[in-house]
Amino acid sequence: MQDQSKPVNKQAKPILEVKNLKKFFPIFKGLFSKHVADVKAVDNVSFVLNEGETLGLVGESGCGKTTTGRCLLRLIEPTSGEVYFEGRDILKLSSEEMRQVRRGMQIIFQDPYSSLNPRKTVSDLIGEALMVHGMVSNEDEKNHRVRELLNKVGLASSYLNRYPHEFSGGQRQRIGIARAIALNPKIIVCDEAVSALDVSVQAQVLNLLMDLKDEFQLSYVFIAHDLSVVRHISDKIGVMYLGQMVEVADSKELFRNPKHPYTQALLSALPSPDPKKKSERILLKGDVPTPINPPPGCYFSTRCPHALPICREMDPAMKWVSSNHWAKCHLVDDRRAAQAGPPNGLHERRKNPFEESPKPQSDITVG
């Protein structure tokens, strides 16, 4: 099996490799709690994150982005799959071994209000992990380190003994960021880290994250639903739909030449900065299928304007499109299929990228 976990850039070193990750939530019914079905929240997700790289995960609400992020840190135990952090499959580690690994993997939560304990001061919120992992030996060392971290995220060291309710949303999120970098991690999962903030504050926090990335040589898994935000911060982007990764590409390549029809629909919703430029919005019909009983074949076939009979029968493999670009679509390597759709404007725009692309060299058997 050839997969996309091999980096295109030979100088880039993978720090995180995810292979066939699944998370199914069982549904029980009846007096005896009979297992009747599963919610397929994450279904065969695979990707690679290189050192110093930011991978953006985007998709509609409920597509499995947050569940994927939490499975990476085993905050939620995956059903199956492999997650390699620095060459070790962390899903096989004991709780004590995982405790040590978590020094290198941290998370920034979406809600800056509920993610901070209201009964603890800033000193305790940030410094607790330092004490637990033995990085400081006494209260004075802890407070000194916390002051340094507060300065790193743009907060005054005098905030040391304040409580979360005394801060604004943006300030609380900065405290969460300080807590995430306290243990000198190598990877940070940013779970909708700016979604709950005002637009002006979003820009400040994004710039802070980018500065910290350069200063501490961090790698990010950046989860968001705002494509403009993801485009600004990400080196490459993974698009998720109904628990599956449907397209992965470098950020510029994805916005320039999206291949999967779902990605095309998402990007068509972005406003153009040029008021004179007319853009045709791709409106998807129907609702997202239930993850309890997804449709056969391609999960997107029930809403895709270019679906063919094969799409409703066979689940497509992740196909190589070009350098560092993959898409989970039957039409990627079948130009005859791309030409078989209805002769309308949307179809022509859909077909043109296939005509421009080189012939795929290999398949990637990623779910």
Image (cartoon, rainbow, N blue to C red):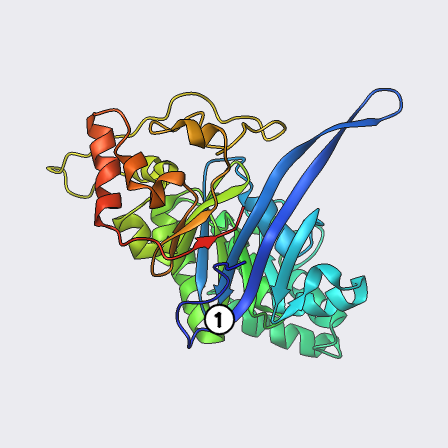
Judging depth in this view, the residue of 33 and 339 nearest the camera is 339
Which residue is drawn at the image coordinates 63% and 44% (left, top)? 114
Q: Quadrant of residue 175?
A: bottom right
Residue 167 sits above or below residue 274 on the image = below
Left or right of 331 in this view: 188: right
Judging depth in this view, the residue of 188 and 261 nearest the camera is 261
Q: Kindly identify which residue carries mark 1.
A: 51
Farthest residue in the left direction? 276
Can the viewer see residue 251? yes
Which residue is drawn at the image coordinates 65% and 53% (left, top)? 81
User: Horizontal and vertical percent for residue 334?
Assistant: 33, 41
User: Horizontal and vertical percent for residue 99?
Assistant: 74, 65
User: Horizontal and vertical percent for residue 277?
Assistant: 13, 38
Can the viewer see residue 112? no
The N terminus lies in quadrant:
bottom right
For label 1, count other residues whose C-alpha is less than 10 Å away and answer few (under 14), some (14-19) or many (20+).
some
Which residue is drawn at the image coordinates 79% and 62% (left, top)? 95
Farthest residue in the front direction? 336
- The number of callouts visible is 1
- Could you tell me which secondary element the residue under label 1 belongs to? loop
Q: Amino acid at mark 1?
A: Glu
Farthest residue in the right direction? 32
Judging depth in this view, the residue of 123 and 317 nearest the camera is 317
Left or right of 44 in this view: 352: left
Which residue is drawn at the image coordinates 47% and 23% (left, top)? 287
User: Horizontal and vertical percent for residue 63?
Assistant: 52, 38
